[in-house]
Image (cartoon, helix red, strand yellow):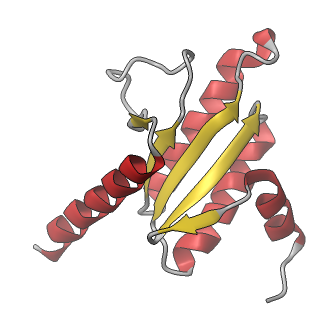
């Protein structure tokens, strides 16, 4: 398989790996505005290959690494999730820290501490979406 520059950068930045048909993406450090476009481009490629479920592993994500950029970094992360939804995918967060917004905030993925639970929830959500689409 030949990778272009965007794919190489995406794989280097987010280190995707597959678990039970769901792609786990590791988000490290903070998120810059350009990361959203890279994230969505990589996710689009993965969806085109047949995988619509994603879990963002946030164990190394720290929006407060640079306090002045914390709201921006979290906004970029949420924008990445919106990009997944617009492409027809489903996404959850794994190991979200204290910075996690209130679950009542619209557009914020569900949060899990155990990878297998996050993966199972994404698969369940995709199954529900498929059943609605079949009607």
Return the x and y of residue 123 as percentages of the image width and height.
33, 62
Tell me where residue 38 appears, x and y as whole percent.
Answer: 75, 54
3 or 33, nearer to the observer = 3
- Residue at image location 71% in from the left, 25% down from the top: 62
Against 57, residue 61 (above or below) is: above
Q: Residue at x 84, y 86 (%)?
A: 2
At horizontal 54% and vertical 15% (from top left) the residue drawn is 98
Residue extending farthest to the left is 135
Residue 70 to residue 13: above or below = above
Query: In the image, is residue 102 above or below residue 1?
Result: above
* 103, 82: nearer the viewer: 103
Which image quarter is the N terminus in? bottom right
Q: Residue 53 occupies which quadrant of the picture?
A: bottom left
Residue 52, image x, y percentages: 45, 67
Q: Nearest the camera: 117 or 126?
A: 117
Q: Residue furthest right?
A: 5
Residue 88 is left or right of residue 97, and the answer is left
Q: Looking at the figure, which quarter contains the C terminus?
A: bottom left
Q: Is residue 66 left or right of residue 57?
A: right
Q: Residue furthest top?
A: 67
Direction from residue 29 to residue 77 in the image, left or right:
left
The answer to whether 106 appears left or right of 86 in the picture is left
Which residue is depicted at the point 69% across and 42% down?
Answer: 27
Residue 126 place in picture, x, y as percent: 31, 63
Tell me where residue 76 sits by quadrant. top right
């Amino acid at each position: 398989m030949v990778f272009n520059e965007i794919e190489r950068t995406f794989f280097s930045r987010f280190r995707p790996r597959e678990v039970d048909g769901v792609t786990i993406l590791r988000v490290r450090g903070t998120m810059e505005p350009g990361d959203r476009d890279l994230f969505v481009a990589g996710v689009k490629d993965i969806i085109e290959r047949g995988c619509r479920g994603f879990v963002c592993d946030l164990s190394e994500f720290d929006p407060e690494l640079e306090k002045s950029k914390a709201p921006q970094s979290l906004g970029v992360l949420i924008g990445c999730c919106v990009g997944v939804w617009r492409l027809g995918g489903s996404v959850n967060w794994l190991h979200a820290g204290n910075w996690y917004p209130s679950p009542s905030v619209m557009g914020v993925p569900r949060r899990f501490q155990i990878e297998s639970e996050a993966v199972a929830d994404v698969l369940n959500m995709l199954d529900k979406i498929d059943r609605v689409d079949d009607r």
